[in-house]
Image (cartoon, rainbow, N blue to C red):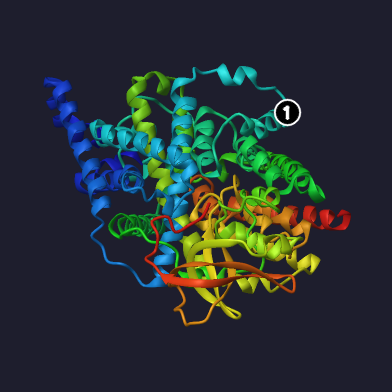
Amino acid sequence: MPVTEQALAPRSQRLERDPRLGRGLLIGVGVLTVAALVVLALVSPGPTLPTRLQDGLTLSISVLIESMPFVVLGVLLSIVVQVWVPPGVIERWMPRRAWARRMVLSLLGMLVPVCECGNVPFARGLMLRGFTVPETLTFLIAAPIVNPIVIITTHQAFGFDDGILIARLLGGFAVANLIGWLYSRHPDPDGLLTERFAASCAFAQEPDALARRDRGRRSLAQFVVELRAVMPALVIGSALAGAVQVLVPRDALLAIGSNPALSIIAMIALAMIVSICSNVDSFFALSFASTFTPGSIVAFLLVGPLVDVKMLALLRTTFRTKVLVGLVVIVVLFAVAVGSVVNLLA
Amino acid sequence: MRESSDTLSDQPRTLRVNGSRLLGVGLAAGLSAVTIALWLTGRLGLYINPESSWFAVSMAIVALAGCAVSFALPRGAEVDHGHDHGDGGHGGHDHHGGHDHDDHERSAHAGVGFWGTAATVTGGILATGVVAAIVLTPPATLSAELAMQRDTGTPPLFQGADTIALASTGDTASFGVGEWASVFATATNPEAFDGDEVTLTGFVTPGDGGFALTRLIITHCVIDAQPASVAIAASGDYATGQWVTVTGTIRDVDGRLALHATSVDEVDQPKDPYEY
């Protein structure tokens, strides 16, 4: 008998004697703990911090409060996809050919109302369900750009000026399928995943794994597991985003000015640093539109949602570092290319 | 491989399961508690646009409920999903034989070596520290220094920008610093605003011929905050970052608008320091 069951034996016996009472008691403890946390946050007995540190923390908090609901929604959807949708239901609707499957997945963002942070747990759910790594990457890269909210806000900000909206949408769709195709050529796609996550996938796809536990309990376990995977990365990514904002002076980037080539590089660097949600980054980019070239705005709008510091930290929970390096290189080169074309045409 | 992990003592395993609960459910609960606390005290607007509070608050409640209920999930039950392979607990695994799963398991153990563990622990401590700081420190607004550092010399462009175009001749009663900053910078008919009496509140940043009245404009959350400022013609010395309420008349001097102050009152920072 392995160690887990030995360790749990006394507890489960205790629970078997009166499972409802034991469970109720534990939930009671949980409710009290959560309530205590809220009270602690209300009282906030800590000191005020030095200005710069406080600014960094304030920025990090705002990113966290903004992205937490999307992460929770992503975790819920991941639970739905993995636990509640019966096997075969999604698969039946998918085309057979690999490239067609990737195209469909890259449009999934139109239906799934999750911002880029929530996409990561949802994508993990897809992979646990049996979708391949390249397919999931295609979804992950496309969804933050090819989704209704982003299309609406980008249109609000730019209209159809300079082809920015069109270039962003087509660019996002194209780069996602390009990445999906490139990684589908990889000899060992499962080797792109962190070992821990690859093992989870292999385990989850065994047929008997699905039938073993009741759904409520599996949902709860999935809730715990997904939060464990995503939360530390989200917190560290947001802290980095906050810190970089206070440490890197923005005028240093802006000083690069309106040189067509350099402006693209500057806006890409800015996009990776500021880590703004793709829902609203167009309004942010709009404030640079008067000083920067349209191509550099497109580059900003392409790179930001896909590979900013916060996203990279989140992606690292699931993919190996070499995949992240590959993604950054491909996305940045692609954005430079699209940006240059837009600059030539505009 | 499995035999060796079975010989691990109970203690580090418990530590790891507890640690992984803290880093998942614990961090989520901390942040959701902060969201709820800010909402209860009406200060959520310090971080995000109040338009999206309903979403943040409802998801925070869902998260807190899930976290509370997760206490009933026996510790270690989540390893049935195989995520916590590193901890040597393979309770749910030994009912099946062979396939290639064992290969995955072996490589999983080879990968989570000393450095992997060290990185997990360091990252975990950092993340916990950040969340603890967020729970413990009182909410704050961005400083005036940051607002100045972010000033790009262009007026902010935000959702409210449309109303400015509509109001190019008429109703400016609802205008805040953000709207007026856009008007000052972009109005094609500045003379139309000449003589308007306005009262505006913001903080002081340095400017020509007096000071600039500044306010941060938020589209979605504080990280996209952009400063907007209005030129104030006034005598007197005001400290940068001091909140003031300025009453005066808009004057068009050679096509450049400025607010000529009749009174400048120092005030406390308002409850809603940002404009949206």
Residue A145, percent across and down?
Answer: 65, 42
Whether residue A40 is visible: yes
Residue A278, percent across and down?
Answer: 60, 47
Front-most of residues B210 and B107:
B210
Q: Please state the chain letter of the residue tagged with numbered disc 1 in the rendered image.
A: A
What is the quadrant of residue B62 in the picture?
top left
Whether residue B226 is visible: no
Front-most of residues B70 and B94:
B70
For image coordinates 11% across by 20% down, the residue present is A17
Residue with the mark numbered 1: A100
Residue A221, percent across and down?
Answer: 34, 32
Left or right, B149 with reference to B237: right
For image coordinates 69% across by 22% down, the residue present is A95
Vertical position of residue B70 compared to residue B123: above or below: above
Left or right, A214 with reference to A25: right
Number of residue marks: 1
Task: Give the quadrant of the N terminus of chain B.
Answer: top left
Farthest residue, direction right: A345
As shown in the figure, which amino acid type bears the numbered disc 1? Answer: Ala
Vertical position of residue A213 compared to residue B205: above or below: above
Left or right, A152 with reference to A47: right
Give neighbour class at mark 1: few <14, some 14-19, many 20+ (Cα, 10 Å): few
Vertical position of residue B163 compared to residue A253: above or below: above
Front-most of residues B31 and A192:
B31
What is the quadrant of residue B249 in the picture?
bottom right
Residue A215, percent across and down?
Answer: 37, 21
Identify the secondary structure beneath mark 1: helix
Vertical position of residue A131 compared to residue A315: above or below: above
Front-most of residues A36 and A120:
A36
